[in-house]
Amino acid sequence: MSQGHSDSDIALFPKNATEVREPSMFRVMLLNDDYTTMEFVVEILVKVFHKHYDEAARIMLHVHNEGSGLCGIYTFEVAESKVHTVHTLARENGFPLKCTMEKE
Ligand code: TYC
């Protein structure tokens, strides 16, 4: 303590340095296929990704025409949860719809 700091101050420094870093972000992408209906993809974009109907329809058509498209950018756990929800809903409805996540 005579030097102006204690052992516990030094021990805490690396922990504090880690805590102030921004989290890595992940792009969640929808992939095109020949079987999932356009209506179902729009529904996914509205319900899972909270898009308004017109934006959802625009993204769905972009995926249909280009092969893939961005649904949103999230932290790892949120992105992973969105991908899981899309695959669960697709399977429940008999569609092969695929969703991926990629680090920004
Ligand atoms: N290509 C599909 C069809 O013609 C529609 C579709 C769009 C499927 C986007 C998947 O991510 C997708 N019915």
Image (tube, grey):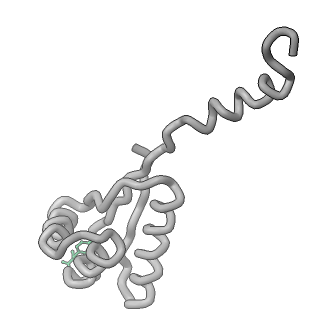
Residue depicted at x 43% and y 57%: 101
Give the quadrant of the N terminus. top right
Classify 5 as above or below 93.
above
Image quarter for ligand 1 equals: bottom left
Furthest toward the bottom, the residue is 93
Q: Is residue 98 left or right of residue 21?
A: left
Name the spot of residue 10 as percent of width and height, x first: 78, 23
Between 8 and 40, which is closer to the camera in this rendering?
Answer: 8
Residue depicted at x 83% and y 28%: 8
The picture quadrant where one finds residue 91 is bottom left
Between 75 and 84, which is closer to the camera in this rendering?
Answer: 75
Classify 58 as above or below 2.
below
The picture quadrant where one finds residue 90 is bottom left
Q: Is residue 11 left or right of residue 39?
A: right
Name the spot of residue 72 as percent of width and height, x first: 32, 58
Residue depicted at x 45% and y 75%: 85
Give the quadrant of the C terminus. top left
Classify 70 as above or below 43.
above
Name the spot of residue 100 as percent of width and height, x first: 41, 61
Between 35 and 71, which is closer to the camera in this rendering?
Answer: 71
Image mark count: 0
Q: Is residue 42 left or right of residue 5?
A: left
Classify 55 as above or below 90.
above
Residue depicted at x 84% and y 21%: 6
Between 94 and 49, which is closer to the camera in this rendering?
Answer: 49
